[in-house]
Image (spheres, rainbow, N blue to C red):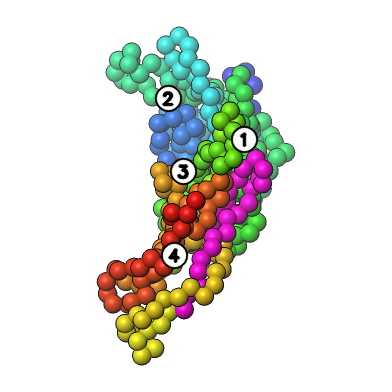
Amino acid sequence: MRSALFAATAFFSLAAISQTAFAEDAPYVDDRSDAAAVIRSLYSAINRHEFARAWDYYGDIKPAKDFDTFVKGYDGTDKVDVKTGAASSDGAAGSIFYNVPVAIQATDKNGEAKVFAGCYTLRQVNAQAQEPPFRPILIDKGALKPSTANFEDAVPASCGDGPPPKQDTVLEQAKKAFVATYGDQCDKQTPDGKPTTEPDAYSLHYKDANAGADEPERETRLFRFFCSMAAYNESAVYYIADDVMGVRQLQFASPELDIRYENNNSEGKVEAVHIIGFQTDDQLVNSDYDDKTRTITSMNKWRGVGDASSTGTYLFRSGNFPLVQYDVDASYDGEINPQTILDYNTAP
């Protein structure tokens, strides 16, 4: 693989991509909605050997003396993977300039991969002041250098004069805890394609019951991780964090039930539902958090039509989520008619 840094113009050119079947398999991305998307689109064009499109992402200053030189600069590389970091921006003289941290992994036709990292600068001329033809966000300059870091960790923290983005250490701790415990058990993606390692996050502020009027509020963070999807039930795992206990997994109380049916037939009439004990669950089924009521509700369907089920409601109190209500529909009668068998909503 051959690569070159154009120091004079601060441009980077990879060793080139040969005409292989990879071009047909690479996804087509042409997104100019933000600076990082333009960089991803650039490498989409390179991977697909659509060099005219790649050339067009640059502004007045091009990455090579002419288009033929630009194309020849990509002879020998099989594919390029790209990652982008948090972009920063700055306005000047009727334009907005964006700095995008970038890392790429270039793989040659022999399978050898090398990592490069650095920054791209892009420019958007004031859209309201433009006349046709419209000029979208364009690459102004860029420089990538060989990196010894793993590709996953090679993206620079920041570019330009802006401070590096703050890392949400609590969120990262929750993600690590989830992966350590459930990385091999849970699905890798949610049904809509989102990674299961990216949870829904909430911030809850409150005062302890015995806190003085002048004492500040405390904060508890709640993280909901999707775990898995079955035929008609999906499961989720919850983590909670505060300044005293740190990050910990939530465990949810649920009653053990003794259900009596007429003639001992679950298709018959329900004669009685008794609580005979309690257990804890590390996952909740068909659950959601309601930020307005500060409750987590879980509904476990006992069969697909949902006419038999159990529903638990967990209310945020003093930094935790105790069980406050439990409803059971044990009838299997084709109708949804649960009865409340536990109600602590009025408890102090």
Kindly report the distance in space between the C-alpha atoms of the residues bearing marks 3 and 2.
21 Å
Please say if 106 is above or below 193. Answer: above
Is residue 235 located in the magenta-colored stretch of the structure? yes
The disc, 3 or 1, on the residue closer to the chain's N-terminal end is 3
Q: Which residue is mark 3?
A: 48
Task: Say if residue 299 shows up in the picture.
Answer: yes
Q: Splitting the image into 4 quarters, where does residue 34 fall?
A: top left
| Amino acid type of the residue that numbered disc 2 sits on in the rendered structure | Ile
Residue marked by disc 2: 137
- Percent coordinates x, y for residue 38 in the rendering: 46, 32
SS at mark 3 in the image = loop
Q: Nearer the viewer, residue 57 or 266?
A: 266
Say which of 262 and 151 sits in front: 262
In space, the residues marked 4 and 2 are separated at their CA atoms by 59 Å
Q: Give x and y (percent) for residue 195.
A: 51, 51
Which tag, 1 or 2, sits closer to the chain's start? 2
Determine crowd level at label 2: few under 14, some 14-19, many 20+ residues with C-alpha closer than 10 A.
many
Tell me the distance, in whole angstroms, between the alpha carbons under discs 1 and 4. 42 Å
Which-is-in-front pick, marks 4 and 2? 4
Secondary element at tag 2: loop
Magenta residues span 232-258
In the structure shown, which secondary structural element does the residue marked by tag 1 occupy?
loop
Work out how far the residue at label 3 is from the one at label 4, CA to CA, in angstroms.
61 Å
Q: Residue at x 52, y 38 (%)?
A: 205
Magenta span: predominant SS is strand
Query: Per the image, is 170 magenta?
Result: no
Whole-percent x, y for residue 138 in the image: 45, 24
Single out the mark in the foreground, 1 or 4. Answer: 4
Q: Residues within 10 Å of mark 1 (few under 14, many from 20)?
A: few
Which residue is identified by label 4? 342
Q: Which mark is residue 167?
A: 1
